[in-house]
Image (cartoon, coloured by chain):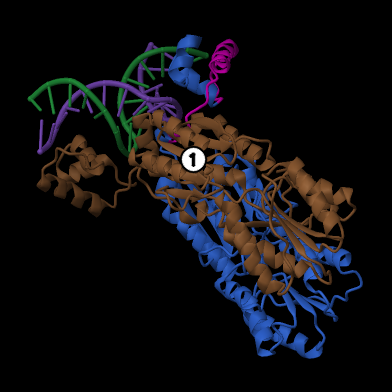
Chain colours: A brown, B blue, C green, D purple
Amino acid sequence: MRPTVHDIAARAGVSLATVDRVLNNRPGVRGVTRDKVERAIEALGYVRDVAAANLAKSRIYPLVFILPEGDNTFMRGLAAEVEAAKARSAVERTAITVFSVPAFDPEALAAALHKARALDPAGVAVVAIDAPEVVSAVDALREDGVAVVTLVSDLPGSSRDHFAGVDNVAAGRTAGTLMGRFLGGRNGPVAIVAGSMLVRDHRDRLEGFGAAMAESAPGRRLLPVVEGHDDPAEVDRLVSNLLADQPELAGIYSLGAGNRGLIAALEKAGREKAVCAIAHELTPHSRAALLSGTLDALLNQDGGHEVRSAIRVLKARADGLSVIGAQERIRIEIFLKDNLPVDPA
Amino acid sequence: MRPTVHDIAARAGVSLATVDRVLNNRPGVRGVTRDKVERAIEALGYVRDVAAANLAKSRIYPLVFILPEGDNTFMRGLAAEVEAAKARSAVERTAITVFSVPAFDPEALAAALHKARALDPAGVAVVAIDAPEVVSAVDALREDGVAVVTLVSDLPGSSRDHFAGVDNVAAGRTAGTLMGRFLGGRNGPVAIVAGSMLVRDHRDRLEGFGAAMAESAPGRRLLPVVEGHDDPAEVDRLVSNLLADQPELAGIYSLGAGNRGLIAALEKAGREKAVCAIAHELTPHSRAALLSGTLDALLNQDGGHEVRSAIRVLKARADGLSVIGAQERIRIEIFLKDNLPVDPA
DNA sequence: CTGTTAGCGCATTCAT
DNA sequence: ATGAATGCGCTAACAG
């Protein structure tokens, strides 16, 4: 049987309350007494039963999620995952509030972070935008003792506790290597479509892609990056122009969202086989395009995993605990038509 | 505040004990009483607090893991993950026993399953071998009310509750598509090295690989499968012979373990760049070979995830509960040198 | 058949 | 500075 607070109390010759004070290092215990208790804890190899502790505390974790608006399918999926987590609130002892903010708008995001702060939550998860006002809003939360996790897009300059997302430089590099090897005999340049250079994850992917292409397909010409703001219609327009201007186009890397526009443009032009296309995020559209062959490969981050991980980390940090590292590492997934997960994502 | 058993008792006008009987559908409650209670549960939208229930029960879950012996790195990693889970036993309320059995030995495995049965555990996780005596040993456990999860290699003919592993036909197919696209201008045949056709996962991978190669590289010659029994030395020997016999060899797919042998043979022959090599399972050796370019791609299943998933499912089944489906689906991971996880696997 | 009571391991008043 | 008592939500003896 594993030791309990009673065992410690008995061994140290003190009461439960004193043991509790030491365990949660609360004030009001003499040094000698504290020592006695700590020795008992050590000797018995005590580990606190978190479930029982939470039960006694009737602990609930008020959490705030801040997500971008817009009809970007990945972000909508992420929002759905947060709703799913909300549905599990009772059993997970969480109370989740969601704030939606305009995409790519640093001021709005900073304002939302301050609004979150007013709620005095245990933790905040936020899809970050790399801007000074956002950094200071995050730092303000941290100074209030609120745990902060960045989601999908990181904020390296800030004091956030954790980033629940993928290494986007590595993701871009992966796309670059795949592109280089898949191009095969095709000649012609490769195009890059981004969402916005304002978010860290897109900048990182671009950097990685360029580096890997230089290695796996040296001398291959890369066209200047175009920004589609993760908007399907805008991406459609941009890619259609690209296809018209570049009859020799060999490949296209879409490192942001707006896959529907990319796919539509390729298929309208009848160039879906001729152009090697690599994109990000598994959605019903991108899945179908992968199966039909319009897309050649898809990189993905599991939004559900990211949300669940963010919650685990937030709860743990709120309690001052550590977490299983390996379980919180978000993988860069590569999907071909053959290894798609069974469920629609 | 969410409703508790007290609320139900009050609303239904019965005692706590009766509520408990209904909740855990234990006998000894009149139909009308049961109805009253059930209506109250429904009306209040009650959901049981599992943590509190486990606390009250002082529930622990005696679990048995049955793993193959041998110095197969993947299996050793799996064993390490089980040890890690054992270290978390206190907080996860599990009591894990591990049985090691000779690899590829159906009788030994069946015997171990019967030995496990004698321990009357709540659940058993087993790396299965596809043989009749194993099927009936598993079925016997299930009839005793013991939850059974197959790990890594499935046992489709049995009554196991769940398979914690990947779709190996799809894994083989993924390897086939990758091989077809990576071969590029190379001519010559492609070789296949298996562990043993006795285990289901190897048979499945072979099937998938053949199918995908026929699509992505039609007409490409496949050499007859050789079996290396997941033994590095034997694989080294087999592959060295293969390389000597086939000076034009374009690719090699290793669908079992024994990567060290594969890598050594390729490098000894100086053919590591000329031959496109795809293998399974991320280990320190395969990771290094991927980074050096000896291996071109690696398929992986996350052993840690599989073990943790098996435990979650076993506990849930032991309690007659369901699980979050998406969280228990094991992905077929594709690794290139660029998207390797940071930690050594 | 149904109800009472006493914990599970811990946190938290309120006394002393 | 320390201790006794009570309760978190649930289960399990034991009574009726």
Q: Is residue A187 left or right of B166 when viewed as pictured? A: right
Q: Using the rendered image of the protein, determine whether residue A228 is visible from the camera's viewpoint.
A: yes
Q: Is the magenta stretch mostly helix, strand or loop?
A: helix
Q: Is residue B60 visible?
A: no
Badge 1: residue crowd in 10 Å (few <14, some 14–19, many ≥20): many
Mark 1, chain letter?
A
Estimate the x, y position of residue B40 in percent, counting from the top left: 54, 14
Q: Give the residue drawn at x 40%, y 32%.
A: A117
Q: Residue at the location (50% across, 10% down)?
A: B12
Q: In this view, does B82 lie above or below A7?
A: below
Q: Which of A138 and B95 is in front in this view?
A: A138
Q: In which quarter of the image is residue A25?
A: top left
The quadrant in which residue A183 appears is bottom right
Residue B94 location (% of width, % of height): 46, 48
Position in image of residue A259 (x %, y %): 74, 47
The quadrant holding residue A313 is top left
Check disc 1 and report its element: helix, strand or loop. Answer: strand
Q: Where is residue A227 in the image (x, y as percent from the top left)?
A: 68, 50
Q: In which quarter of the image is the C terminus of chain A?
A: top right
Residue shown at the point (45%, 11%) measured from the top left: B10
The count of marks equals 1
Residue at mark 1? A125
Q: Work out whether residue A315 or residue B118 is closer to the camera in this orientation and state it.
A: A315
A332 up-or-down from B26: above or below: below
Q: Looking at numbered disc 1 in the image, what kind of residue is underneath it?
A: Ala
Left/right placement of residue A63 relative to residue A39 reads: right
Indicate left or right for A266 with A116 as reference.
right
Does the magenta portion include B36? yes
Which residue: 20% across, 41% down? A9
Of residues B194 and A334, the one drawn nearer to the viewer in this rendering: A334
Q: Is residue B11 above or below residue B306?
A: above
Task: Give the magenta-colored segment's residue range.
Answer: B25-54
